[in-house]
Amino acid sequence: MSLSRRHFLRTSAVLGAVVSVPSTLRTNEPVSAPAPGLPPLDRAPNGVREYELTIAETSLRLDGRSARATTINGSVPGPILRFREGEQAVIRVHNTLSEDTSIHWHGIILPPEMDGVPGLSFPGIRPGETFEYRFAVNQAGTYWYHSHSGLQEQLGHYGALIIEPAERRGPAYDREHVLLLSDWTFENPYRVLSRLKKQPDAYNYQRRTVADFFRDVGRDGFAATVSDRWMWAGMRMNPTDIADVTGATYSYLLNGQVAEAPWIGQFAPGERVLLRVINAAAGSYFDVRVPGVPMTVMQVSGQPVEPIETDEFRIAIAETYDVIVQIPDDRAYAVYAEAMDRSGFTAAALAPRHGMVAQLPPRRKRPLLTMADMGMDHSAMGGMDGMDHAEMGHEMPAEPSAMATDDEHAGHDMGAMESASALRAPGTLPPETPHGTDAHGVGNAMVPMSTKSRLDEPGAGLGDDGRRVLLYSQLRSAAPYPEFRAPTREIEIHLTGNMERFTWAIDGVPYDQAAPIEFTFGERIRLTMVNDTMMNHPMHLHGMWMELENGQGDRSPRIHTINVKPAERVSLLVNADAPGRWAFHCHVLYHMEVGMFREVRVSAPTGHEGHHDAA
Amino acid sequence: MPRRHRVSLGARALLTALALATAGSSAAAQARDSVSHQGTHGMGWGRETFVLTEVLEYAPAGAERPVLFDVIAWTGGASRRLWFKADGSAATVERATHGEYQLLYGRMLSPWWDVQVGARADLRAAPGANASRAGAVIGLQGLAPGWFEMEPSLFVTTEGNLSFDLTASYDLFLTQRLVLQPRLESTFALKDDEAFGVGRGLSSTSFGLRTRFEIRREFAPYVGVVWERGYGRSAELARLAGESAGETLIVAGLRLWR
């Protein structure tokens, strides 16, 4: 046995439960030593911090195999970019690819021409060209950056962006680690998308089978099981449709490594360790916990919140969470991140030293969607028996009966202009609302009977095993925002789609056929999103914060990305204070690619030339 | 002679159909390439080309030891597609083939249904018994409540013969990769068409039970049993031609898509 093999076996035993599978022993896999954590950030000369980033197609090893990735400075993920609040960022991006590229700074408030969205902010970075990003860093917290070109993000084009506050504030921590979650496939991402369009459940290997049917008959009885199956089949919906792309093709990565050869972060017993968790995946939500150790949530979307202790949190695609863990004992722990559909997981280890063994928890069963995910009459959900389920399935207007005309959309797209006095108080939850008559076009698969706030629900597959799960409704901004004003206008948009054709859109209209959403400078918009699909959609607005109206009044948390659950109605307040053209989209890469995307145009302040006038 | 003339017409229609389908697929490939290089998100659905060989099988114990096929292909976007369909058989004991070929334009009618209109050519080649017929088709293709794949269509030939075809199938997941597929094909005709062995009324049904194993989703070998049966006037025509009115076939094949 060579030295390197012995070295590998010893270190990989940190996650013994996984390594016991013989097929995962790869002697040529380089094993990283425990990372000590981020060092203190030096002072930038003249307050200007510069980075050189090279985008390249690189051969490297991922999940023990040789991979062709689109890398930033040669690695997946790219380098951790660090700044201090108040600095000037100068980032030169060199494109050595044979196609255009771009970098978007996710969650950063900056001028529109620096936002990195080809076609909106700038033309993109051509092959062989260099683009210099320059912007003032006026915020602190955990963010990330990624390509906004095609499907490059699926190929490894992402990294962490960490900003230190101008002066240390908030509770102290002794050490900090960045934990960047992502997903990798050895397939061409365009092939993945093509497969999804031709057979949308191509990656679902967790369907209900004949054996499940008989098990359910044994448990629930024949009539109830048949009516349950008929309810779903009658609507042509699949309750196991939790993720489009699954562990069938994905290798789930944490800091670029898989659980079989994990990334290892060091800690000393008793230390307060800050974990900056980023979900940079293209198509995967994760449920994150440190089994045996409670976590204290400190920041969400880079913004400080009142500390909340929890056992587990769901991180939607593109979200960022900071948690503090304090481990008293001298042993290794796993940071365990299970894909939402339970088709796989990734893990890292927190260990005081080399060579310690962390236990992985048992895997959990894949969740099923429920009637609440279809927007069944929520109040009537109480004591229904099996037969009632079936009847409700028929009543649900799952198939729009009439073709919607473009005129109907135009009216709906922009929402109803209402006087400020008609809008409910800021920071309050939207009421349960029956769906209107617009079925969002001939191709839209579903219109929920009614939609309501689901911010107090943990989400599919969580909250039923005794663990505390972080809820959006718990989040309170650490400090009230100085101007927590009432909204002046409400815009309601509907997230729509058809999983059988893999068409995803907003208000039934894909991006290439849609007009921009217009904000007038100075407005305070209530952006209400209604999810008319059975999938979760992580919606991200560029250029402006969204204040999540979660019932916490002027402590409504400020976020860059919101997960909208199936059949959920959620509202966010946006100050239209950033003139220009901005992207607003679902952060499931494949949903965005097929059209779940809009331009948001903020008009120029009166008396100024607008950024978008040139367009 | 008129019959021979129609053969060449049918063959030309088939060639045109194949040429269009090929052109469509290369155009779709170009469209995909341009999307992937343009580098902007949220373009919309784009174009795809899908080819599904639902049936490609051999029945070694059948009287003609036939190779049976049923291929469906489309190219286009989410709401408008050009379709090509081929369904038929080829005997291996003699040079005899029978095929139905369709070139259709389809539009999305609802989330789960497309309506299709176009041309169909039926070609039959056997020693001393070549035949062809052609005509127009209108049909539906989609998913009925309960996850039933359905393909009802109306076919009117240039001679005014009207028939109704229905194909229906269902995928029953025994495990995540082992799939049992019952599949029914039936024809109902308003008039006899002796050259094609089609009799008035419920003419024929073919009911298959195939069990496939999806090694990949796109690649699934299968075994199955197919009950083919002619009825009434069709059965009579078969007996007159010295054939049996029904046959039970054990089949082995491959289901493929890309």
Image (cartoon, coloured by chain):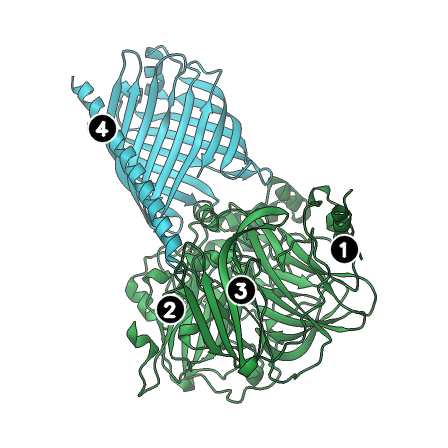
Q: Is residue A539 above or below residue B231?
A: below
Residue hosting label 3: A565
Instruction: State the CA–CA distance, disc 4 to disc 2.
Output: 51 Å
Q: Which mark is residue A14?
A: 1
Q: Amino acid at mark 2?
A: Phe
Chain A: colour as depicted = green
Instruction: State the CA–CA distance, disc 3 to disc 4.
Output: 54 Å
Residue hosting label 2: A122
User: Closer to us: mark 3 or mark 4?
Assistant: 4
The chain containing the residue under callout 3 comes to A
Looking at the image, tell me whether mark 3 or mark 2 is earlier in sequence order. 2
Question: Measured from the top left, where is residue A455 in percent x and y?
Answer: 57, 71
- Using the rendered image, report if marks 1 and 3 lie on a common chain: yes
User: Closer to us: mark 4 or mark 1?
Assistant: 1
Residue hosting label 4: B12
Crowding at dot 2, Cα within 10 Å, few <14 / some 14-19 / many 20+, comes out as some
Q: Amino acid at mark 1?
A: Val
Q: Residue at x 51, y 76 (%)?
A: A89
- Using the rendered image, report if marks 3 and 2 lie on a common chain: yes
Chain B: colour as depicted = cyan
A111 or A246, nearer to the observer: A111
Q: Which mark is residue A38?
A: none
Image quarter where the C terminus of chain B lies is top left
A178 or A529, nearer to the observer: A178
Q: Is residue B213 left or right of residue B64?
A: right
Q: Amino acid at mark 4?
A: Arg
Instruction: State the CA–CA distance, disc 1 to disc 2.
Output: 46 Å
Q: Is residue A226 left or right of residue B55?
A: right
Image quarter where the N terminus of chain B lies is top left
